[in-house]
Image: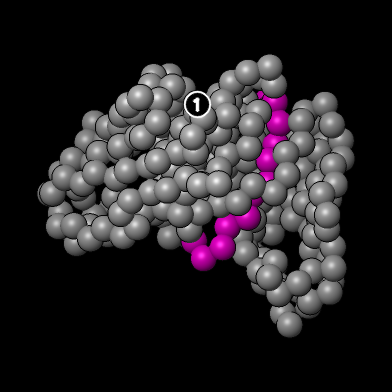
Amino acid sequence: SQQGEEDPQALSIQEGENATMNCSYKTSINNLQWYRQNSGRGLVHLILIRSNEREKHSGRLRVTLDTSKKSSSLLITASRAADTASYFCATGWNEKLTFGTGTRLTIIP
Amino acid sequence: GAGVSQSPSNKVTEKGKDVELRCDPISGHTALYWYRQSLGQGLEFLIYFQGNSAPDKSGLPSDRFSAERTGGSVSTLTIQRTQQEDSAVYLCASSLGGGPRGGASSYEQYFGPGTRLTVT
């Protein structure tokens, strides 16, 4: 069964706006990772946040983690057409990553 | 450097036939994962290798599915007597695996482009 659930399932915004996606999970984690998938093929790793971290930045990406609420958010600032993709959160525990169902993000030029 | 490669990129097979999917991980990556993704869905974990051992086979859907890894490198996922519900994209990923940072899940995974399997 899936550990993480992303919200919303789909999101469409105008280019230049910020996009926020949320992920909720149910059990203990060592870390939480976000991945991007274009065209239904291979995934690309975006960012990893450890369970003892609360916020992390990478370029236009900002990830937060609230372990008390078992939730994380991914913020993409100043969105671009090239950001159109599916975004997945994945929760890590020991040897295994468990992926959520994804958010489909569409950037409208 | 070379990333994770998978072959074939597409495979169409008749129901009841056996198929073999291949994954070449990044050199030096000790951990290797197989996932399955049905159309518009998330990733379903199938099996995990650390070196040549598979400590977690919990995701294999049935005994028709098996996987092996040799030389701590190439892995093959075999599906016997394929069924139409096996149609999906099969993704392989590798990572540096366990170490000082904790279990293998503490490392980012590098994905191959996937094999799209269609069972007719």
Q: How is the image coloured?
A: one colour
**Where residue B70 sits in the image (x, y, percent)?**
32, 26
- Residue at 83 percent across and 54 percent down: it is A59
Amino acid at circle 1: Thr
**Disc 1 is attached to a residue of which chain?**
B
On screen, residue A93 above or below B10: above
**Where residue A65 sits in the image (x, y, percent)?**
81, 38
Question: Foreground: A56 or B4?
Answer: B4
Which residue is labeled 1 in the image? Answer: B30
- Residue at 69 percent across and 49 percent down: it is A46
- Residue at 82 percent across and 49 percent down: it is A58
Examine the rendering and report whether any part of residue A64 can be seen: yes
Question: Foreground: B106 or A99?
Answer: B106
On screen, residue B99 above or below A42: above
How crowded is the residue under tag 1: few (<14 C-alpha within 10 Å), some, or many (20+)?
A: some
Q: Quadrant of the C terminus of chain A?
A: bottom right
The answer to whether B116 appears left or right of B17 in the picture is right
What residue range appears in magenta?
Answer: A27-40
- Residue at 62 percent across and 64 percent down: it is A85
**Where residue B12 sits in the image (x, y, percent)?**
23, 60
Residue A72 lies within the magenta run? no
Examine the rendering and report whether any part of residue B87 can be seen: no
Instruction: Residue B38: name its quadrant.
Output: bottom left
Question: Foreground: B72 or B54?
Answer: B72
Q: Name the element at disc 1.
A: loop
**Where residue A29 sits in the image (x, y, percent)?**
68, 27
Number of numbered callouts drawn: 1
Residue A32 lies within the magenta run? yes
